Image (cartoon, rainbow, N blue to C red):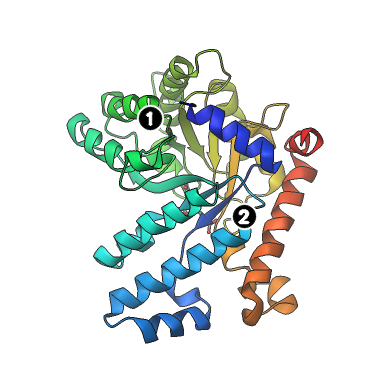
């Protein structure tokens, strides 16, 4: 069995980019053709929405699978349409895995240890897609309940070759209200980072990166720089690029000199590219898939031009 870090590194190297496409389907922004097809095929409103989300995400996966190493389905949007949404999410994850992509399920779970165990076995399939019903390679985790609640996730991840991304310094405007509080002379996020580094170093073995990753927002570049120093064994997931204002240069400190160590996520900026310039003018809604492809290529080029991810292209 390969570890998550090994599989991730191979996927990033093969595609030559750390770009991560976020699958955040939003009803009001879906192309009309998809909405209409779903309406004609389903009866209840939640069936219509779930069917539309599934088709939209499958088609995005088909476009980006040749270009990027990973996708990040956002569970919230699927959960919002009830049981049909849960089935749709499971099928979208499968489809992405069948397309050879690493799948990070963004469900931000976290609970007392015995409950965390159930979450871990539900989501963390790791190397074997049949090992869990939501067959993800990795899962986002909320660490607020304490390190003991992370241990069941770490055990399952290590046993199955799966990964975790623990919220350390989030991208939202209010992130600092709790995360920047200081205790024992350090910020709360710094304490969380120190604990994640210990867990990652334990699971890294001989390798540079472990199974325990961290989420750090692109919208806080100086915190990102600090956190990369604190967590040398921790693979990073960086949201906030694009729609939230983070730039490629803001993410540069996340990478090692070979261009590994971080995935940079963009969700709305890619999947709804047809709704914003320059893609709206160039493609429009009728060519929304071409807009997705162009926005993905532009993001890949931007990361290669302004971050150490350039080394991935050179070594491809
Ligand atoms: O865990 C995450 O992915 C996450 C953490 C964070 O600090 N900020 C953040 O935006 N996210 C997620 O990343 C995605 C960002 O979407 P866009 O702003 O559309 O690129 C959403 O699915 C968010 O839930």
Q: In this view, does 191 lie above or below 64?
A: above
Disc 2 and disc 1: Cα gap in Å? 36 Å
Query: Who's the residue at 30% across and 36% down the image?
Result: 120
Residue at the farthest top position: 206
Identify the residue position indicated by label 1 in the image.
Answer: 160
Query: Who's the residue at 67% across and 51% down the image?
Result: 67
- Few, some or many C-alpha atoms within 10 Å of disc 2 (few <14, some 14-19, many ≥20)? few
Query: Who's the residue at 41% across and 48% down the image?
Result: 106
Foreground pick, 95 / 45: 95
State the image quarter where residue 297 is shown: bottom right
Residue 129 x/y as whole percent: 40, 42
Identify the residue position indicated by label 2 in the image.
Answer: 245
Question: For this view, does 52 lie left or right of residue 248?
Answer: left
Residue 18 x/y as whole percent: 64, 42
Q: Can residue 235 be seen in this view?
A: no
Foreground pick, 74 / 15: 15
- Few, some or many C-alpha atoms within 10 Å of disc 1 (few <14, some 14-19, many ≥20)? many
Q: Quadrant of the C terminus?
A: top right
SS type, badge 2:
loop
Query: Who's the residue at 48% across and 46% down the image?
Result: 103
Residue 56 x/y as whole percent: 49, 69
State the image quarter where residue 261 is shown: top right
Question: For this view, does 11 lie left or right of residue 108?
Answer: right
SS type, badge 1:
helix
Q: Quadrant of the N terminus?
A: top left
Q: Can residue 245 be seen in this view?
A: yes
Question: For this view, does 188 lie left or right of residue 204?
Answer: left
Q: Is residue 299 above or below residue 207?
A: below
């Amino acid at each position: 069995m390969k570890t998550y870090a090994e599989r991730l590194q191979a996927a990033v190297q093969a595609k030559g980019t750390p770009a991560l496409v976020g699958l955040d389907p939003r009803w009001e922004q879906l192309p009309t053709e998809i909405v209409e097809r779903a309406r004609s095929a389903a009866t209840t409103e939640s069936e219509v929405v779930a069917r539309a989300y599934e088709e939209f995400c499958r088609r995005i996966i088909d476009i980006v699978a040749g270009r990027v190493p990973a996708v990040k389905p956002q569970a919230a949007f699927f959960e919002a349409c009830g049981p049909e949404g849960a089935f749709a999410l499971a099928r979208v994850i499968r489809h992405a895995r069948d397309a050879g992509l690493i799948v990070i399920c963004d469900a931000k779970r976290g609970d007392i240890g015995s409950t965390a165990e159930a979450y871990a076995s539900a989501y963390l399939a790791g190397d074997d897609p049949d090992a869990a019903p939501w067959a993800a390679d990795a899962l986002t985790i909320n660490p607020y309940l304490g390190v003991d609640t992370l241990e069941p996730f770490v055990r399952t991840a290590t046993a199955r070759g799966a990964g975790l991304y623990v919220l350390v310094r989030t991208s939202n405007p209010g992130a600092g209200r709790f995360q920047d509080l200081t205790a024992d002379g350090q910020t709360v996020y710094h304490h969380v980072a120190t604990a994640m580094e210990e867990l990652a170093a334990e699971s890294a073995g001989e390798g540079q990166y472990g199974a325990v990753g961290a989420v750090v927002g692109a919208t806080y570049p100086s915190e990102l720089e600090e956190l990369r120093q604190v967590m040398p064994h921790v693979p990073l997931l960086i949201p906030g690029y694009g729609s939230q204002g983070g730039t490629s240069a803001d993410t540069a400190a996340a990478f090692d000199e070979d261009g590994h160590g971080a995935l940079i996520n963009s969700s709305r900026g890619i999947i709804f590219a047809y709704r914003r310039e320059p893609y709206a003018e160039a493609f429009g809604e009728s060519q929304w898939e071409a807009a997705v492809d162009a926005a993905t290529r532009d993001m890949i080029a931007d990361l290669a031009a302004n971050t150490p991810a350039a080394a991935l292209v050179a070594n491809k």
